[in-house]
Image (cartoon, helix red, strand yellow):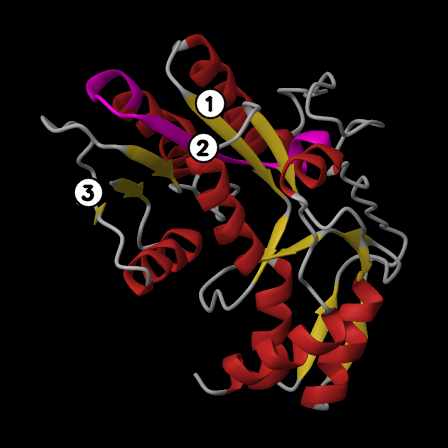
Amino acid sequence: MYTIFGSKGFIGNELVLYLKRRRKKFFLPKKNKYKFKKNLGTVIYCVGSDDWQKKVEKGFFSNLGHLQKVIFNNEFKSLIFLSTTRLYINSDKTLENNDIKLNPNVYNDYYNILKIASESLLYNSKKKIKILRLSNVFGFNSKSPLLLPNLIRNALKKGKIEIRVNLNSTKDYIHIDDVIKMIMKISSNSKEKVYNLAAGKNIKIKDLADIIQKYTKCKIFLKNQNKIIQEPKININKIKKEFGFKPKLNLKVDLPKLIKKFSEL
């Protein structure tokens, strides 16, 4: 049996659909309930908050605070925690066992601190746990405030998009199908405790903007072009070696399909 915390979110909902199609047994706890008498089987903790910058308290509880209630109040076979490759944002190397550089005085490090604290909590809990560090997940997430969904919504609704970083800034995107597939594989059989799950190569913001403009005919306005963000290239050798993982995302094919889905809202 699978227990999914955060089943109403983007990844959690996709997991539920996957399990339904394959007629797998699953349990979806009600919101704000974290203690149960029965064994929860394989727990997948998808609770998170994309608006952690504006809602600091919500960010704390969703990314860390509620997790300890799940760990210490329940029996379960194993637990998979969805972490982030943003942990490497200040680092030169991106192997899973590399040191993580964080500064509590830096505004943008707050989310990373919550995630690494959760990882540390899991390690020290002595439970059977797995940690999956995800890059930017690509898929139909209609309410997300993140960069790509926001650009698509504005292009379709307003006929224009604003790029607030240098066009040569880069991000790593992993397809939602890859995320679901690897969660299931790791939940059933895996050798390690922590894995990076990413494409392993970065995409320029310019490439995203060009495709969005091509399919929506939107206008592009540039701001803050002196601000360039280069996300580190994520090392995915571990997950490739153990599972034969090959990233699915084809930007020229998948981004137009995603734009079409948003246009149907």
**Count of numbered badges drawn on the protein:** 3
Instruction: Check the image and report above or below for 199 versus 167.
Output: above
Task: Report which quarter residue 67 is drawn in.
Answer: top left
Q: How far apart are the alpha carbons under marks 2 and 3?
A: 16 Å
Instruction: Please state which of residues 189 and 109 is positioned toward the viewer in this rendering.
Output: 189
Instruction: Check the image and report above or below for 205 versus 40.
Output: below
Task: Report which quarter residue 48 is drawn in.
Answer: top left
Instruction: Find numbered disc 3 in the image and state the secondary structure of the residue it sits on.
Output: loop
| Percent coordinates x, y for residue 262 in the rendering | 52, 79
Residues at discs 1 and 2 in contact (Cβ within 8 Å): yes
Residues at discs 2 and 3 in contact (Cβ within 8 Å): no
Task: Report which quarter residue 126 is drawn in.
Answer: top left
Instruction: Find numbered disc 2 in the image and state the secondary structure of the residue it sits on.
Output: strand
* Earlier sequence position, callout 1 versus callout 3: 3
Q: Which residues are magenta?
A: 71-88
The residue that disc 1 covers is 118
Q: Which mark is residue 21?
A: none
- Identified at 63% across, 64% down, the residue is 148
| Percent coordinates x, y for residue 120 in the rendering | 51, 15
The residue that disc 2 covers is 81
Amino acid type at image mark 2:
Phe
Residues at discs 1 and 3 in contact (Cβ within 8 Å): no
Relative horizontal placement of residue 105, taking residue 204 as reference (left or right) = left
Amino acid type at image mark 1:
Ser
